[in-house]
Image (cartoon, coloured by chain):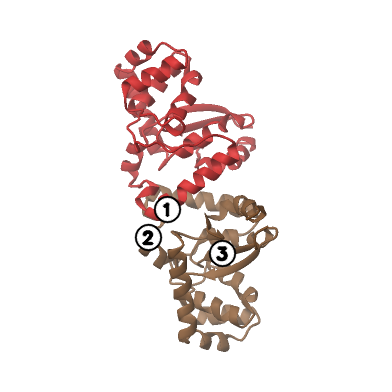
Chain colours: A red, B brown
């Protein structure tokens, strides 16, 4: 058996990341490493374009996202401010990882974006999401002013690009890359393979 | 129940169409209508780009295609001449439909492209594929000079674009569109839904 490590690169701006987020812990034998990254920087570095750049593709994706939300049994409501700058939210998730409270706040950021129609670029909105999750907003908001946390987000993003990422969500099992919410079965197979 | 009709738009140049082609008849209660279309014209009309336009995406797709081929238990060998002009092959598949011999020749065109490394833009190659399938190559090759067959390919392509297609394979159940080889479960659900 391999180590079971799954590197899971995501951004709160990615609807397919929101969809898959509740599914990744269901992978058997997986040790999921959550890797916040800036999707915009990945798109720019690779020359990839958001699906909405092709009008009919954007329209189709809305229907596809709804089908997956229904399949997973989760709510989905498109945000009225889109796309958003998720830099601060991603830094907050790194700060929360360091303080051991990541899982208390991480799903809340996704739900803020794809269920509650909130603006994650707004510091007041972020602080309220954190408080509502029962955490100390002041501590985390002050954490993300540190260069160390800014650097970690940059390094995550650079690593994702170096390893071949062109969108989100992207998963790695060793050197094998998997893109999208709809490749979990292949990831499970990779985890069960002897290396 | 709905009518069970599934419009299946494909092009022999599309690797994901090749992959799914052996799966579509497994849809329960489906009446599959095979609709050859010119993928290049669809891309041009919608502003969509082939995945290989983003280098890392192209590289990933090769790995993804191999995973699906393994899952389906079919061979896959990338063609040394790619992309190819599949206009004549698509017209031949329409001619074969009219003569009631479509299923004798249709899989052979896909295999010529994605298993046997043949050049489908070459009339001699096409004639040999047809003969090897036990059909009269002269008859079909002469059929595709007719305006009526050229028109049908044009009309298929225009209809695909009008209905929202941006790639291949694309399926329709009524007004519902499904893109890719990996949406068969959603198509099955749509077929089983009461309209």
Chain for disc number 2: B
Q: A176 or B182, which is in the foreground?
A: B182
Q: Residue at x 60, y 32 (%)?
A: A2
Q: CA distance from mark 1 to mark 2?
A: 9 Å
Q: What's the mark number on residue B8?
A: 3
Q: Is residue B112 above or below residue A108?
A: below
In this rendering, position of residue A126 left or right of residue B32: left
Q: CA distance from mark 3 to mark 2?
A: 19 Å
Residue highlighted by disc 1 = A57
Badge 3: few (under 14), some or many (20 or more) residues near its Cα, within 10 Å?
many
Badge 2: few (under 14), some or many (20 or more) residues near its Cα, within 10 Å?
some
> What is the x, y in percent for residue B112?
56, 70
Q: Is residue B105 visible?
A: yes
Q: What's the mark number on residue B188?
A: none
Q: Residue at x 29, y 17 (%)?
A: A145
CB within 8 Å, label 3 to label 2: no
> Which sits earlier in the primary sequence, circle 3 or circle 2?
3
Where is the C terminus of chain B found, in terms of image quarters? Answer: bottom right
Q: Residue at x 56, y 85 (%)?
A: B140
> What is the x, y in percent for residue A157?
37, 32
Q: Secondary structure at mark 3?
A: strand
Q: Is residue A83 above or below residue B66?
A: above
Where is the N terminus of chain B found, in terms of image quarters? Answer: bottom right
Q: What's the mark number on residue B46?
A: 2
Q: Quadrant of residue A73?
A: top right
Q: CA distance from mark 3 to mark 1?
A: 18 Å
CB within 8 Å, label 1 to label 2: yes
Q: B63 or A184, which is in the foreground?
A: A184
Chain for disc number 1: A
Q: Residue at x 63, y 29 (%)?
A: A29
């Amino acid at each position: 058996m391999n180590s079971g490590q799954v590197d899971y690169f995501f951004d709160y701006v990615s609807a397919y990341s929101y969809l898959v987020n509740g599914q990744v812990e269901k992978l058997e034998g997986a040790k999921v490493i959550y890797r916040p990254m800036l999707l915009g920087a990945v798109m720019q570095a690779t020359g990839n374009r958001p699906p909405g750049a092709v009008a009919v593709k954007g329209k189709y994706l809305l229907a596809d996202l709804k089908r997956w939300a229904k399949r997973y049994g989760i709510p989905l409501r498109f945000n009225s401010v889109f796309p958003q700058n998720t830099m601060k939210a991603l830094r907050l998730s790194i700060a929360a990882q360091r303080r051991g409270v990541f899982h208390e706040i991480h799903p809340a950021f996704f739900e803020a974006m794809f269920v509650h129609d909130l603006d994650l670029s707004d510091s007041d909105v972020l602080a309220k999401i954190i408080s509502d999750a029962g955490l100390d907003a002041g501590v985390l908001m002050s954490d993300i002013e540190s260069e160390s946390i800014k650097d970690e987000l940059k390094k995550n993003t650079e690593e994702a690009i170096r390893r071949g990422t062109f969108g989100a969500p992207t998963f790695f099992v060793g050197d094998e890359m998997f893109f999208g919410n709809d490749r979990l079965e292949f990831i499970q197979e990779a985890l069960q393979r002897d290396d």
